[in-house]
Image (tube, rainbow, N blue to C red):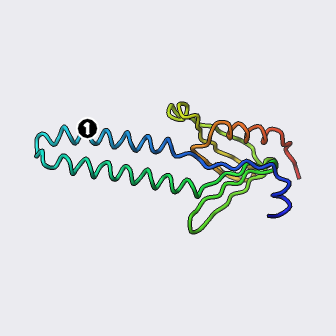
Amino acid sequence: MNNDDQKCEKITTHPGVEKYQIKIAAIALVISVISLLLIQFISANIETYLLAIIWGIAILLMIIAEINKRFVTVDICTEDLTFTKGILKTKATVIKYPSITNLHVNRDILDRILGLGQIQVDTAGSTGIELEVDGLKMEHIKEIIKRAQKTPLQVE
């Protein structure tokens, strides 16, 4: 732990995967209903196996999403924002608040229900979005915005 970490009032969070798990379950449900309707014309013996395969894949995808969540962190410090991801090979993106030019917050209906959002960060010198994090709690997004607004733009 270096001196910067000790001085840093840090908030560490993991983006949520609830939104993706709900979407996976909804897709599995739709596929199940459609397959049940189509099976009536083929054979009733396939019904149980097909449903088991559909829901088995859905549950596996949900578990994978939950495991991946453990290897993604967002550190909201007083001077910078750090996004780290990876299992075997990790990648970290550190953005100093003074270099942030634009913050975009996107939320769909499911995000609003779950209290989540997506944040996109543009920085000076980049040609597009430098950082995009989906599934952050709105309280953390508001904290990022608050800290970015407190930091005056430094021109060198």
What is the three-letter code of the residue carrying label 1?
Val
Image coordinates for residue 67, horizontal then vertical, percent: 51, 56
Say left or right for 44 vs 61: left
At 84% from the left and 44% from the top, the residue drawn is 153
137 horizontally vs 98: left or right: left
Q: Which quarter of the figure has residue 28?
A: top left
Percent of width and height locating residue 119: 63, 42
Q: Residue at x 75, y 46 (%)?
A: 100
Q: Residue at x 64, y 63 (%)?
A: 91
Percent x, y of residue 71: 58, 58
- The picture quadrant where one finds residue 143 is top right
Q: Position of residue 140 (x, y in %)?
A: 68, 40
Q: Is residue 6 above or below residue 152?
A: below
- Secondary structure at badge 1 equals helix
Between 121 and 32, the one nearer to me in the picture: 32
The residue pinned by badge 1 equals 33
- The residue sitting at 86% across, 42% down in the picture is 152
